[in-house]
Amino acid sequence: MERTPFFAQLEQSSRRSGSLLCVGLDPQLDGIAPADVFPLNKRVIDATCAAACLYKPNSAFYEARGAEGMEALKATIDYIHEKSLPVLLDAKRGDISSTAEAYAKAIFDVLDADAVTLSPLLGSDSVEPFARYVDRGLFLLCHTSNPGARDLQELDAGGVPFYERIAAAAQSWNSRGNIGLVIGATYPDVLARVRALAPEMWFLLPGVGSQGGDLEASVSAGLDAHGSGVIVNVSRAVYGASDPGAAARELRDRIEAARAAKAKAAGSAAIGPASPGSDIVERIALGLHDLGAVRFGEFTLKSGRTSPIYIDLRLLVSDPALMAIVARAFAGLLAGLRFDRIAAIPYGGLPIGQAAALATGAPLIYPRREAKDYGTKKLIEGRFEKGETVVVLDDLITTGGSKLEAIAPLSDVGLKVTDVAVLVDREQGGREELAAHGLRLHSVLTLSSLLDILVRRGRIGETVRSDVRQALELT
């Protein structure tokens, strides 16, 4: 029988239980005999299954008990499945591809876990054997909950902390939609930064309870635009409680209260469907207006058209803080695309492309506007290989003509282009023109959404928005 993909299972389980609580099943080595592990797990599961959406046994506590411990682990996984709940095996595997294949077989085929935690430090080939199990989930360690996480995970990695590189890599590897991230509840500020980078990924939040993680702050920082996307893991505070059921229900209720508080702060009765990364998009729109990059009047565009609004994104180079936010937005926008390199269009798209490359870890190239008449006389700057796929990046799009002009030299050297990403889509035919050439357009902002944000935040009046929409024939 075909298996429901893990994250679909997780969503169903969360809706059914009204919970984002994951219960850790970690039988400590002192005081629990191997023969008592499964009976104890069974009692905890029976007491908590109405309040939990996921269970996470830590493989170490079972492996340390030898064959009897592994039998208890398999029995525990099977029993959780009898309760129609998914299982995340906390194994933190990470090795070369051939060994990873064996680990994946053991965890998914033999133990029948629905998901696993992995260390991504060996790179994509160590993750791929697990990711090939398209119906299973992977949670990659991004920024862990322990104090020593700062030793390596916050090291500077080309202008951004190393954990942001991991988040960007995870998104680029997530072509099958089965990868999430582990981010400790002990670092809410990190959670907020990674949520901006990865607006649609699921996060596993360890560290609440004995490690001192702030449940309310971490839930608020980690929730996605739909009021979901985080799983709060609690182990000892539930597993070792005198009444595990009551402990689980209390935690579930605290999580739900934090969700409600976040929704209220956002100005709605409940967090409903919204554009991914809507908070960061609003920050960009307001930042561009404050920078003077969005002006109203009468202007002639490069296309020859007149416009009542002018968007000058070249000003972004003068605001590094805003550019950093734009880079994070592009990292989220590009997360679902398959590409080898970013190809930024000079001049407006080039600094944004460099910032996006730093945020995502993707290498950058760019087509020159004119060939050099000295040296190599090449038209494409940067390293690339024929046959690679590039995503073309620019600051904005009006009609699409300049994008097609920039794509031509890329195609001429054997690069493949299927996607174009821009900061602002002026909604004046560019999307349709690209589509006619088999190209997909992706934008952080549309002109309509930009105007809506400026009206909502009192930067312009309704009359200005109406005049712009009428003049540009925006539907």
Image (cartoon, rainbow, N blue to C red):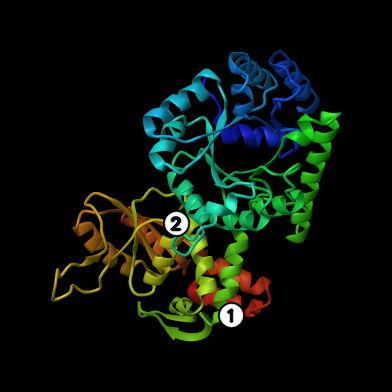
Residue 154 lies, with reference to residue 381, above or below; the image says above
Q: Quadrant of residue 78?
A: top right
Q: CA distance from mark 1 to mark 2?
A: 26 Å
Badge 1 vs badge 2, beta-carbon distance below 8 Å: no
Residue 318 lies, with reference to residue 71, above or below; the image says below
How many numbered circles does the render carry? 2
- Say which label, 1 or 2, has the lower sequence index: 1
Q: Secondary structure at mark 1?
A: helix
Does 362 sit left or right of 416 as displayed?
A: right
Rendered residue at 67%/26% (across/down): 85
Q: Quadrant of residue 334?
A: bottom left
Residue 419, given in percent of the width and then of the height, sits at 37, 55
Residue 400 lies, with reference to residue 48, above or below; the image says below
Residue 247 lies, with reference to residue 448, above or below; the image says above
The residue at which mark 1 appears reads as: 290
Residue 426, given in percent of the width and then of the height, sits at 46, 69
Mark 1 surroundings: few (<14), some (14-19) or many (≥20) residues within 10 A: few
Closer to us: 358 or 322: 358
Residue 343, given in percent of the width and then of the height, sits at 33, 61
Rendered residue at 83%/35% (across/down): 247
Q: Secondary structure at mark 2?
A: helix
Residue 246, given in percent of the width and then of the height, sits at 85, 32
The residue at which mark 2 appears reads as: 360
Amino acid residing under circle 2: Thr
Rendered residue at 35%/58% (across/down): 363
Does 309 sit left or right of 9 as displayed?
A: left
Any mark on residue 137, and which? none
Amino acid residing under circle 1: Asp
